[in-house]
Amino acid sequence: MEVETVQTRKTLIDRLAPPTTWDLLVIGGGATGLGIALEAVSRGYSVLLVEQADFAKGTSSRSTKLVHGGVRYLAQGDIQLVREASIERGLLWRNAPHLVKNQTFIIPIYTFWDRLKYTIGLKLYDWISGRLSLGSSVFVPRSKALQKLPNIRSEGLVGGVLYHDGQFDDSRLAINLVQTIIEQGGVALNYMKVTGLLKDNGQIAGATITDVETNRSYVCKAKAVINATGVFVDEVLQMDNPTGTKSITASQGVHLVLDKKFYPSNDALMIPATSDGRVLFAVPWHGKVVVGTTDTPVTEASLEPQALEKEIAFILENASRYFVQQPKRSDVLSVFAGLRPLAAPQGGNQKTKEISRSHKIMVTPSKLFTILGGKWTTFRKMGEDMVDRIEKELRWPHKKTATRNLAIHGSVANVNLNDPLYFYGSDKERVKALMNGHSNEWLSTSLQIHEAQVVWAVQHEMARTVEDVLSRRTRALLLDARESIRMAEPVAAIMAKALQKDNNWIKEQVASYTKLAEGYVLKS
């Protein structure tokens, strides 16, 4: 069943007006909220999901682009999380093959002890993955390692250990999940902000929701309300109980995007030991290289977190220890930061990199369901666990999960990764047909973005702003921030025509986007 999402946006909003009681109201349109909504609607529940900004606006569009079991978690001894993540990685590869690929990684080895340690550790990683493993790890001798790791420091190199993990496009997956939820009969809306919670005899009974675009408010009743707002969970919890204690701590992760010339390999690089004890990745992505990440505690949550100078210096310094051609600030095409919502540790001083990435479900006395922690790889399992918990707490009959083998919108086998439109999956031919009906000019030849993709984003993917298109429907902002600024005006003009907006809207959008995108450009 094909659903043209933006054409149904008004229809979807109209479904909020009647005095309907939803089974589940999910607050938050990132990975976690989308996973919960899809889990619930696929079990047959009526579901409304609302997001205050755009889908995946926050952390869920700013990941390292990995669907992974977590080599680092293995080093910390968290076998259960590695096992769960490895299973989920395999399921997502199967359910969204147009977005998830089998990515080989190489750890450069400079000592015999490292060879022994990482060979044994990654064999354990393979074993934990079981039948959902993406491939076996192997030791790669020096000569082959130098071929596979061009521009890597060769002095003292013994070889490398090659292993397999997943690589994906995070915000594209979010959009496809929205489409899948709607196809399953649910409602998912961006730019809808929860402004208050409803209670009936002290129990949560729904929420007041305001359409950010029109400022119109809706009273939405629900049998279960889920707080899946990531780093903003405490704001919703305080709507329920203004005197509640802090539930989460936030950790910032920063990534730099470089030209492929600095690391012209199809194999991702995993740097196993940085100056702060973390691992660092250099991952090929959409013709560029994403290098990261950091783990910096932050005190305030923001929709647009900014990279700190010390984080930028840390990544450049550690990358330069391995790259022959050392990247400078002026070589960075884009810098982006995301905030990880971690369950606040009890007892104070624990470093953010040591806090478990496993998820945690909380239920308040008034029956507000909140989920903390987690990561993209385990979004489906988080949804399953949450709906199971709701059924148990509210004494609903248990319904079996239907998402383990549920194909996500766009799912198609035999993906040609050399096609710049590959990530549209089963929609690709329709996008190409739309291109043929337009002027056939690329908005950006370097990023391979066509004006028809803007029209498609508006008509089928609920894009409402220039930022929605350039940051999350296409990935221009993350791949080359300066190039995306150049594209802002033509994108706004195309969107204005499709959304029936005037010249003032175009000017406002271009100014707003330019200001935002300049935060992704490193000043020399």
Image: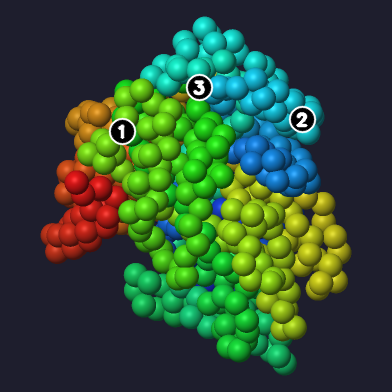
Q: Is residue 277 above or below residue 146?
A: below
Please tell me how crowded label 3 is: few (under 14), some (14-19), or many (20+) other residues with Cα within 10 Å.
some
Q: Earlier in the sequence, mark 2 or mark 1?
A: 2
Would you identify the image quadrant in which residue 432 lies?
A: top left
**Circle 2 sits in a helix, a strand or a loop, which is it?**
helix
- Residue at the spot of label 3: 267
Q: Nearest to the eye among marks 3 and 2: give it.
A: 2
Give the quadrant of the N terminus. Answer: top right
519 relative to 387 in the view: left or right = left
Q: Position of residue 110 (x, y in %)?
A: 56, 22
Are the residues flagged by discs 3 and 1 in contact, CB closer than 8 Å?
Answer: no
407 relative to 315 in the view: left or right = right
Q: Position of residue 358 (x, y in %)?
A: 69, 54
Say which of 398 and 357 sits in front.
357
Say which of 349 and 25 sits in front.
349
- Residue at the spot of label 2: 124
Q: Amino acid at mark 1?
A: Pro
Q: Position of residue 416 (x, y in %)?
A: 47, 20
Q: Is residue 33 above or below residue 369?
A: above
Are the residues flagged by discs 2 and 1 in contact, CB closer than 8 Å?
Answer: no
Q: Amino acid at mark 3?
A: Asp
Q: Is residue 508 above or below residue 130?
A: below
- Residue at the spot of label 1: 327
Q: Residue at x 41, y 16 (%)?
A: 150
Q: Earlier in the sequence, mark 3 or mark 2?
A: 2
